[in-house]
Image (cartoon, coloured by chain):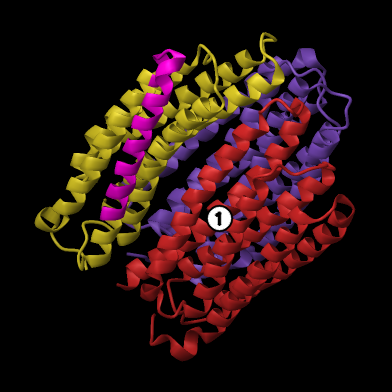
Chain colours: A yellow, B red, C purple
């Protein structure tokens, strides 16, 4: 069921490239959000939510195209998993922004900018990898780098958590901030899961 | 290894139908639980736990039947994943009920009934889909609807979370209620994961 | 692509055996950690972190060997998933130890030793199963026992959670302890996920 993939897979590669660009746009809104004064946050949350909808539509387009395709550039299951995992990334960024807005968090903790910087770097690597999916074996560096960023994100996250408990905040405030930074941490994990699917595709092709 | 599936798969379809009915029964107990006065909760928690055991037994029956079957209606891996994902649904509902009981939560927050309503609707769709697994391509509407319910559940959950922090509850009470509603949110996610497996089976068959 | 597995797979079985031993060593450090006086914890956290690095290296060695192998003892995807799942076990134990250290938790709650005992038993079963991966069908007892331990771990965890809220601790302290015991609970889940992958390999081979 697998044939030379140049003409067949192009539509999939185009859609994944679109999803990658959308992640890039979302992470920029996230960066603006964590730097913005409180009164600009509602606007940015709305923009993030609009991008999340764009991502949903692109994910559905991939799955519908999969339903209609007789030949696919990779295993159907892997295309499906890749689409779902990419969708998770923006879902977690949107959840972080949504919770920070709903909770009316007054001040985000200091380490959040470092968390978001790592997400920006993972987003750039992911957006660059998507147009190159036709040659997954050449994406080893991408996979290794995203894994490294996730390890760094873990460290930043745990230091951030422990700083939340430094005694300057009451328990309810800590809980709210924890929910927000946990969603950001899950976004970092989600980038790693995307890279893992790409790597498992490369492993099967090798 | 795959042959016409009518006679072969019937036992699997019967077992999945049984699991679907059990989820339907569990969600009814959950609905009673969230409406019941505190002194009736222990009884209902016990009934939920009994249903969780029934579900475990059915899951094991599916996996044992898989171990003994030479031909299967779908990929072995998908049967296995479907069984495990269905099991997760009741596990999370049982965990919610168990925690609310253990924590001696006095009053569940208002939005919980809306959460449970969405779980009831997802349970009905799932129970109706299970006897129709022999034609997974016809289950697209089920998959789309469960995904829609999960999006709605996300929104309800986040509004509920932010209402928990309205200042009327102390931090320890918020933490307890948060654990309960998180398990309910994970039950909604689990319904989506079930639908995702069904959809990925349909994609392979197409 | 699958041939008789004795000579081919040996390198994989050796690497998985190594990972199993490393999990055994990690759980011993975890046991020492939860029993140790506060001033010895930093040392033990460092030892745990060193073992986590050893595990990372072994995981990468498995994946690199997979990249270079033309024939593999199981599906490539399953080898990959097994490596990733095993890695998760030590990650969660390391996270528990790291958080307890960062949070400067003064006293771990009583039930933690019961949690760690269950992890020790799951670790022993896992370490014993790894050298026997060449005959996954004979590992049914391992899978059943790890599932049983996970159920027990669930119960211990929920009782532990509810004891945390007995009113003797303030909310910030409860939050810190909850983070630590949650990581231990996730380590128990991770052992079950490892066993699930092994079982799904056995199912395919049957």
x%, y% of residue C161? 79, 37
Task: Using the image, name the chain to which the residue with label 1 belongs.
Answer: B
Q: Is residue B84 left or right of residue A125?
A: right
Which residue is at the front of the view, C116 or A51?
A51
Q: Residue furthest bottom?
A: B7
Q: Which residue is mark 1?
A: B190
Whether the magenta-drawn stretch holds residue A46 is answered as yes
x%, y% of residue C162? 82, 39
Q: Which quarter of the rendered picture does the N terminus of chain B lie within?
A: bottom left
Quadrant of residue B22 in the image? bottom right
Q: Residue furthest top?
A: A168
**How many numbered circles does the render carry?**
1
x%, y% of residue A146? 37, 31
Residue located 60% across and 55% down the image:
C195
Predominant secondary structure in magenta? helix
Q: Residue C18: tell me if it is visible.
A: no
State whether residue B172 is above or below residue A14. above
Whether the magenta-drawn stretch holds residue B130 is answered as no
x%, y% of residue B26? 70, 65
Badge 1 local density, few (<14 within 10 Å), some, or many (20+)?
A: many
Which residue is at the front of the view, A66 or B45?
B45
State whether residue A110 is above or below residue B104. above
State whether residue B15 is above or below residue C108. below
Q: Which residues are magenta?
A: A33-61
Residue located 46% across and 67% down the image:
B78
Which residue is at the front of the view, B128 or C86?
B128
Q: Is residue C50 left or right of residue B48?
A: left
Residue located 77% across and 32% down the image:
B173
Q: Which quarter of the rendered picture does the C terminus of chain B lie within?
A: bottom left
State whether residue B143 is above or below residue C150. below
Quadrant of residue B197 in the image? bottom left
């Amino acid at each position: 069921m697998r044939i030379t993939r140049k003409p067949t897979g192009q539509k999939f590669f185009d859609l994944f490239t679109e999803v990658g660009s959308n992640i890039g746009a979302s992470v920029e809104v996230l960066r603006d959000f964590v730097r913005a004064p409180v009164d600009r946050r509602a606007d940015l949350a709305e923009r993030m939510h609009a991008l999340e909808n764009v991502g949903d539509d692109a994910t559905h387009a991939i799955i519908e195209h999969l339903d209609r395709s007789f030949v696919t550039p990779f295993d159907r299951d892997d295309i499906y998993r890749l689409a779902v995992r990419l969708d998770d990334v923006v879902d977690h960024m949107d959840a972080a922004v949504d919770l920070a807005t709903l909770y009316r968090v007054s001040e985000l903790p200091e380490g959040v900018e470092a968390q978001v910087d790592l997400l920006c770097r993972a987003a750039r690597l992911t957006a660059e990898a998507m147009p190159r999916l036709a040659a997954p074996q050449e994406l080893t560096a991408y996979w290794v780098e995203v894994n490294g960023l996730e390890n760094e994100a873990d460290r930043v996250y745990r230091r951030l958590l422990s700083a939340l408990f430094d005694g300057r905040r009451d328990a309810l405030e800590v809980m709210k901030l924890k929910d927000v930074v946990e969603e950001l941490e899950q976004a970092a994990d989600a980038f790693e899961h995307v890279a893992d699917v790409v790597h498992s595709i490369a492993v099967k092709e090798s």
